[in-house]
Amino acid sequence: MRSAARLLTAAAMALLPVAASAQEAAAPAADPAAGLSEWAKVYEVFSHPRCANCHVEDNRPRWSGAHYGVTRVHAFNVQGGNDGSGFGNPGLHCTTCHFDRNSSVLHGPPGVAGWHLAPPEMVWFGKSSAEICAQIKDPERNGNRSLEEVAIHVRDDALVGWGWNPGPGREPAPGSAQATYEALVRWAAAGAPCP
Ligand code: HEC
Ligand code: HEC
């Protein structure tokens, strides 16, 4: 019995280094080049007007794209709101004009339920790829999310989803919510490198 136990211990010890190296191989290796090419896809989406026009630092959404002519501050003196909610000032809430679906006419207000402006610390409009990358990794500025939670937000959130279904005349964001989710997951697995 005793010798059998000794034999087993010896066998277990012989296996140990194997197990350790198998674990190392399974851990995601930081691969900056692969990560940066995934980030480039994410940046193309985040910086697109369908996303960035709601992610501004001055509390004023933007209008931009082919049917607007030049990029401009949202008309009607629309602002995120003095209460910091992003839903607009009393008497001029976003949902006064933006309903739970897109207007079917060109220049009509687009919409999904819960339309409101992103908080100013989540700013992308006019920011570089490096700046957006740093913001998205910073829990102080990304709503205290892990990178996995950021990816899930992109895959599942209704306001994000609108970016690929923006209504007449507006160019959708590139790719899809699912493809952007997958790029974020691969970027995180590669060590989440920033340019
Ligand atoms: C008085 C009505 C009104 C209010 C209030 C309003 N909007 Fe709009 N919004 C519009 C209209 C109309 C359009 C479409 C304009 C066009 O297509 O020419 C629009 C378009 C937009 C767009 C689309 C820009 C793009 O990328 O194509 C965004 C984003 C937006 N509004 C955000 C907001 C937010 C956020 C609020 C609240 C803080 C808000 N709006 C409040 C009328 C309003
Ligand atoms: C109508 C306005 C609006 C549009 C359009 C919009 N967002 Fe947002 N976004 C918000 C708001 C509001 C929040 C804050 C929600 C929260 O923290 O729960 C937010 C938060 C986020 C976050 C959370 C983390 C962070 O640091 O920003 C991500 C990621 C995000 N949006 C991605 C996108 C993408 C990608 C698009 C375009 C495909 C997009 N959003 C379009 C309003 C918008």
Image (spheres, grey):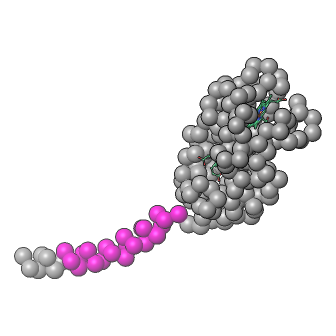
Left or right, residue 6 beside residue 91 = left
The N terminus, quarter of image: bottom left
At 86% across and 42% down in the image, what residue appears?
73
In the foreground, 188 or 108: 108
- Confirm whether residue 16 shows in the render: yes
- At 68% from the left and 44% from the top, the residue drawn is 86
Residue at the image point whose x is 80% and y is 58% from the top: 128
Residue 1 lies, with reference to residue 114, above or below; the image says below
Q: Nearer the viewer, residue 44 or 34?
A: 44
Task: Tell me the quarter of the picture where residue 29 sits.
Answer: bottom right
Q: Is residue 11 magenta?
A: yes
Furthest residue toward left: 1
Residue extending farthest to the top is 104
Q: Which residue appears farthest toward the right when viewing the image?
A: 69
Image coordinates for residue 75, horizontal then vertical, percent: 85, 35
Percent of width and height locating residue 47? 77, 48
The quarter of the image holding the C terminus is: bottom right
The answer to whether residue 111 is seen in the rendering is: no
Q: Position of residue 150 (x, y in %)?
A: 59, 51
Magenta-tinted stretch: 8-28
Q: Nearer the viewer, residue 133 or 6?
A: 133
Is 4 inside the magenta-drawn segment?
no
Q: Is residue 133 left or right of residue 143?
A: right
Residue visible at 62% across and 52% down?
184
Query: Would residue 3 be found to the left or right of residue 143 on screen?
Result: left
Provide residue 119's location: percent of width, then percent of height. 68, 50
- Location of ligand 2 given as a quarter of the image: top right
**Dividing the picture into quarters, in which one does residue 8 lie?**
bottom left
